[in-house]
Amino acid sequence: MDAVAWLLESGEPAVRGMARRDLLGEEHAEDVLSGAIVSRLLTDACADKRAYKKWTGAHWRIVSLAELDVPAQEPRAVAAAEYDLAEVMRSLKHGVTVIDRLVRRCASVEGNTLGACSRFGMAADPRLQQLAEGLIEWQWPDGGWNCDRSASGRRSSFHESLAAAWGLHEYYRVTGEAAARDAALRAGELFLEHRLFRSLSTGEVINTRWLRPSYPPYWHYDILQALLVLSRLGLGKDERATDALDELERRRRPDGRWNAGTPLWGPIGGNRTPEVVDWGRSGPNEMITLNALRVLKAAGR
């Protein structure tokens, strides 16, 4: 099977358009807002009392909407982003925790909010500047972030660092803020230093779960999401990403697609971390296949 042709036959216009643009170099030419997944994500996006509620809250929806290329300044997306941004800013009123001169902050929250809001045309909002400046200030010496109060300070959290790097990159992309770019690249260097999934001391796999991409990743780290962020940072061809690219190719199905992996979300309407859309819990997955082909292309493979 031609995986690109399969993506071009997707029922979701966003997937068709992104495949056409990013894999074939052709015009997007799709009405993203007419897609069933996008429509559902936009519906009642602010209904949950907490924007961060897993996984139906506005926080998670706006990241998915950004990844589905919802146009900047789409009113419903902006309203959901504003709902999430207001919650994040309220949490900052309580200050940040500092232990051993290191800020302990779950920076994936600010990173996801910063990235999605930047995508939706909100970068001129002074609150986004505050988020970007905060992330830069909280960055640990190794280039990442961590909210673990008991962490020694020797190493930050890959989970918390990946979304923060993405958010800073998106903010830089629309503002040209060099400090945000530099902080994102420092985080990218952290991942590359570890070849994305290996221990510095032993070379062994840090966490085998990182080798099995899931979609959406939410705040979780895995090699595909890391490769995607690195490619956006312009680091997709770095030779230190070779091990992760090899592992990604090894997981490719004989028909050229990639499977869904272990889902992090619960079924629609369930009691435990339900989603609002069905991303596919088994079999070949469109977004994982699309992102895998994107990063392989960016790497020149």
Image (cartoon, helix red, strand yellow):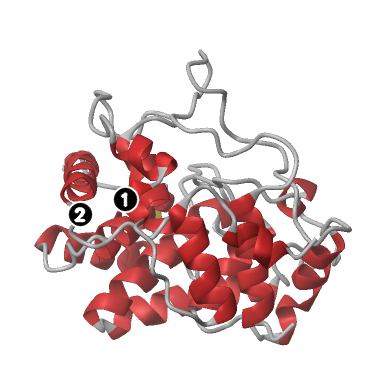
Near mark 1 (Cα within 10 A), the count class, few <14, some 14-19 or many ≥20, is many
Task: Examine the rendered structure and indicate whether residue 118 appears above or below residue 32.
Answer: below
- The tag on residue 74 is 2
Estimate the spatial distance between the alpha carbons at disc 1 and disc 2, rounded to whole Å. Answer: 9 Å
Q: Amino acid at mark 1?
A: Leu
Q: Which element carries disc 1, helix, strand or loop?
A: helix
Task: Examine the rendered structure and indicate whether residue 63 appears above or below residue 138.
Answer: above
Task: Examine the rendered structure and indicate whether residue 72 appears above or below residue 261.
Answer: below
Quarter of the image where one finds residue 253: bottom right
Residue at (56%, 23%) from the top-left corner?
267
Q: Amino acid at mark 2?
A: Glu
- Looking at the image, is mark 1 or mark 2 earlier in the sequence? 1
In front: label 1 or label 2:
1
- Residue 101 image offset from top left, x and y in percent: 39, 59
- Residue 228 image offset from top left, x and y in percent: 57, 67
Instruction: Tell me: 242 left or right of 119.
Output: right
Instruction: Tell me: 123 left or right of 71.
Output: left
- The tag on residue 33 is 1
Instruction: Tell me: 41 left or right of 290.
Output: left
Instruction: Tell me: 267 left or right of 145.
Output: right
Marks 1 and 2: CB-CB under 8 Å? yes
Near mark 2 (Cα within 10 A), the count class, few <14, some 14-19 or many ≥20, is few
Quarter of the image where one finds residue 115: bottom left
